[in-house]
Image (cartoon, rainbow, N blue to C red):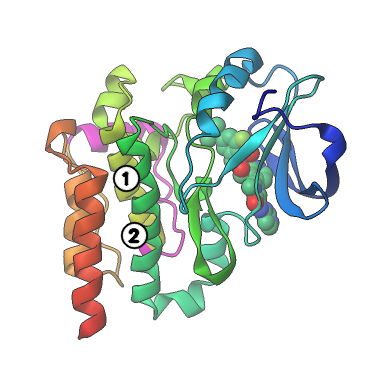
Amino acid sequence: HDKWEIDPQELMLMEELGSGQFGVVRRGKWRGSIDVAVKMMKEGTMSEDDFIEEAKVMTKLQHTNLVQLYGVCSKNRPIFIVTEYMRHGSLLNYLRRHEQSLTSNQGLLLDMCIQIGKGMAYLERHNYIHRDLAARNCLVGSENIVKVADFGLARYVLDDQYTSSGGSKFPIKWAPPEVLNYTRFSSKSDVWAYGVLMWEVFTCGKMPYGRLKNTEVVEKVQKGLILEKPKMCYKEVYDVMRKCWSQLPETRPSFRVLKEQLVSIAQRLLVD
Ligand SMILES: Cn1cc(-c2ccnc(-n3ncc4cc(C(C)(C)C)cc(F)c4c3=O)c2CO)cc(Nc2ccncn2)c1=O
């Protein structure tokens, strides 16, 4: 019996949550009581067979700061991807909607970064690369729980506007030099993206590099220019961001180290 295969008859679909990269995502109930989100994969948007194969691995990745993949309905089309439900939606929207209350609460902003760092340290330990880490791809649940979503899915996107670094949908502003030049993804390219995500958190959801066009950002990043310190961000937190933006991947800290550094900063700050 394939553990990762979900019987669609055990699903009750509810309101639409939005339409992501692969089509409509709806809220639902699984087996009558479990809150889920159901991605209904639009035909031709993802290499489905490869994904279904990978789903077996993904269901095994379990951590409090990762949005849990419960399984897939792959026996008919469109295929459904069933995951844990997060009631407050994307972190990016949450930051923008709650800017007023968040600006004075650096402890909470730092805690959000630490939670994501823990989820990413778990993926790093399992040699799992996200490939599109950003505030838009993290989700917020109750009690300010934050989790990393859609890790690894970038490999199955068929839209080459998204997959090729010259494409209009490629996440240029979250990409390090080795990805811009050779699309060389690694946990250290996730670390670069994590630095940009920290900047998003401490600016309550501003767009990195403002209105600069992608071509201008590529030029700046390759020249070593980096994002400025957000106004309401501790100096030592910005120093951690800057380490994530080292030109060379090997000079960037691992998520294991990053998490420890942020936790010790949080302990020092929350004591004072
Ligand atoms: C699990 N989950 C998913 C979503 C939700 C809804 C629509 N699109 C998406 N997205 N968003 C982004 C996304 C990105 C990718 C890349 C391959 C990384 C490019 C692949 C995806 F498949 C998605 C996706 O499905 C999500 C994220 O997967 C919203 C939730 N919750 C709420 C709650 C209230 N309001 C809105 N959403 C929720 O709990």
**In screen coordinates, is 30 left or right of 153?**
right
Which corner quadrant of the figure contains ligand 1? top right
Q: Is residue 238 above or below residue 82?
A: below
* Drawn side of residue 262 relative to residue 143, left or right: left
Question: Residue beneath label 2, please?
Answer: 114
154 above or below 200? above
Q: Which mark is residue 72?
A: none
Count of marks overlaid on the render: 2
Residue 203: within the magenta?
Answer: yes
Screen quadrant of the C terminus: bottom left
Q: Amino acid at mark 1?
A: Ala
Q: Is residue 94 visible?
A: yes
Q: Which mark is residue 121?
A: 1
Question: Can residue 234 be spotted in the picture?
Answer: no
Magenta segment boundaries in residue numbering: 202-223
Which one is in front, 18 or 29? 29
